Amino acid sequence: QVQLVESGGGLVQTGGSLRLSCAASGHTFSDYATAWFRQAPGKEREFAAGINRISTNTYYGDSVKGRFTISRDNAKNTVNLQMNNLKPEDTAVYYCAASAVIRVASRWPSNYTYWGQGTQVTVSS
C-alpha cells in the first residue's frame, strides 16, 4: 500500500505557473504508474497527466497538452506536475493517483487504487 500527499497548490494569475508535488510513502514507488487528475466544482474528475513506472512515457489531457509537464523521481518517491501558462479553466482540486496494477498510465480514474487528499489550484483572470 502507498500513501500520497500533494503539495504546491495555490492562487495564481492567468499566465502564471505552479509546480505541484506528490510525495509517496509506504511502498516501492517505482512499482506504481502515477497520474494527476483534477476536478472542478460540479464537474467530473478529469485526467491531466500520467507517467509510467519508469518514466518511459508521459501522457496528457488535451486541455493541458503543451502547458503541463509531468515527471517523477523514483529515488525521492515523488511525482511532479509543472503547470505553465495557467488559465482560469485550470482552476480545480488536483489529485495525485497511483496504481500497481497497470504498467501504462491510464486516463481512467477507476484504474487507480491510491489517491492523495488533493490540493487546490485557483487561477484568477
Image (spheres, rainbow, N blue to C red):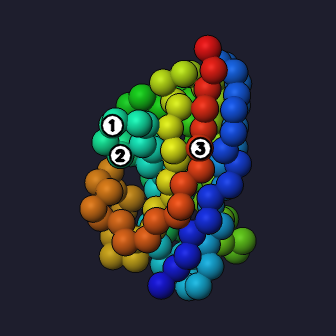
Left or right relative to 24: residue 99:
left
- Residue 64: x and y in percent read 48, 32
Residue at image location 66% in from the left, 44% down from the top: 9
* Mark number, residue 45: 2
Going by the image, does 31 lie left or right of 29?
left
> Disc 1 marks which residue?
43
Residue at point 29%, 54% (across, down): 108
Mark yes or no: residue 43 visible: yes
Instruction: Name the quadrant of the C terminus.
Output: top right
Q: Residue furthest front?
A: 42
Q: Nearer the viewer, residue 33 or 21?
A: 21
Residue depicted at x 42% and y 28%:
63
**Local SS, label 3:** strand
Tag in front: 2 or 3: 3
Viewer-nearest of discs 2 and 1: 1
Question: Tag 3 or tag 2, which sits nearer the N-term?
Answer: 2
* Residue drawn at x 65%, y 48% as measured from the top left: 20
Q: Is residue 61 visible?
A: no
Q: Residues within 10 Å of mark 2 (few under 14, many from 20)?
A: some
Question: Under tag 2, what secondary structure?
Answer: loop
Residue identified by numbered label 3: 120
Is residue 10 shown above or below 3? above
3D distance between C-alphas at marks 1 and 3: 15 Å
